[in-house]
């Protein structure tokens, strides 16, 4: 197995965050063309982008745009390689990743499968394609 390195993961995460910021900016500009768009709609859209982008991409395509298109890594089930991780498990993975931040990544170098804390908990692995 060729597991993704910490630097691969950081690069992919950075690319994805830039893409999310650009998407949010474009959405904001589009919404400014309409009168009286409620603030609650804007908040729901931005939170949805932030919390659903990664779960949708990983559960359906085994990776985000940053992971798949630029860094060439994918996320799969550890116990069933070749299979995408279930959507609800990816939501848990994403919430853990954002909650723990860099702490979650500290285990990558010491883990035989280079798993972060959030990967170990939901039993996922990140592989180089």
Image (cartoon, grey):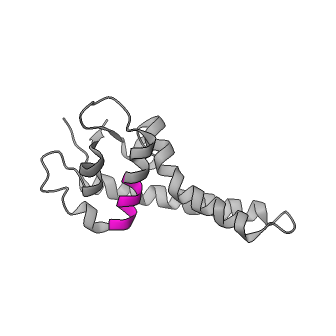
Asked if residue 82 lies left or right of residue 69, the reply is left
Asked if residue 95 lies left or right of residue 53, the reply is left
Residue 99 sits in which quadrant? bottom left
Task: Pick whichever, 126 or 88, lies toward us.
Answer: 88
Asked if residue 40 lies left or right of residue 35, the reply is left
- Residue 122 to residue 100: above or below: above
Residue 24 sits in which quadrant? bottom right
Task: Pick whichever, 35 or 123, lies toward us.
Answer: 123
Q: Is residue 106 within the magenta segment? A: no
Q: Position of residue 29 (x, y in %)?
A: 74, 64
Magenta-colored span: 93-100
Extreme residue in the right direction: 35
Which residue occupies 35% across, 60% down? 97
Which residue occupies 51% across, 44% down? 56
- The tally of labels here is 0
Which residue occupies 33% across, 59% down? 10
Work out which quarter of the rendered image holds the N terminus and state it. top left
Magenta segment main secondary structure: helix
Q: Position of residue 127 (x, y in %)?
A: 28, 40
Which residue occupies 42% across, 60% down? 14
Q: Position of residue 75 (x, y in %)?
A: 34, 41
- Residue 66 to residue 24: above or below: above
Work out which quarter of the rendered image holds the C terminus and state it. top left
């Amino acid at each position: 197995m060729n597991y993704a390195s910490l630097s691969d993961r950081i690069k992919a995460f950075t690319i994805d965050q830039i893409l999310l910021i650009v998407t949010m900016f474009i959405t904001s500009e589009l919404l400014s063309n309409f009168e009286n768009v409620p603030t609650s709609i804007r908040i729901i859209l931005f939170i949805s982008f932030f919390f659903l982008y990664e779960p949708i991409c990983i559960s359906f395509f085994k990776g985000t745009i940053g992971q798949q298109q630029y860094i060439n890594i994918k996320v799969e089930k550890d116990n069933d390689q070749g299979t995408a991780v279930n959507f609800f498990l990816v939501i848990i993975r994403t919430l853990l990743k954002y909650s723990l931040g860099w702490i979650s990544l500290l285990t990558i170098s010491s883990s035989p499968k280079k798993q972060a804390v959030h990967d170990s908990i939901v039993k996922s692995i990140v592989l180089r394609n």
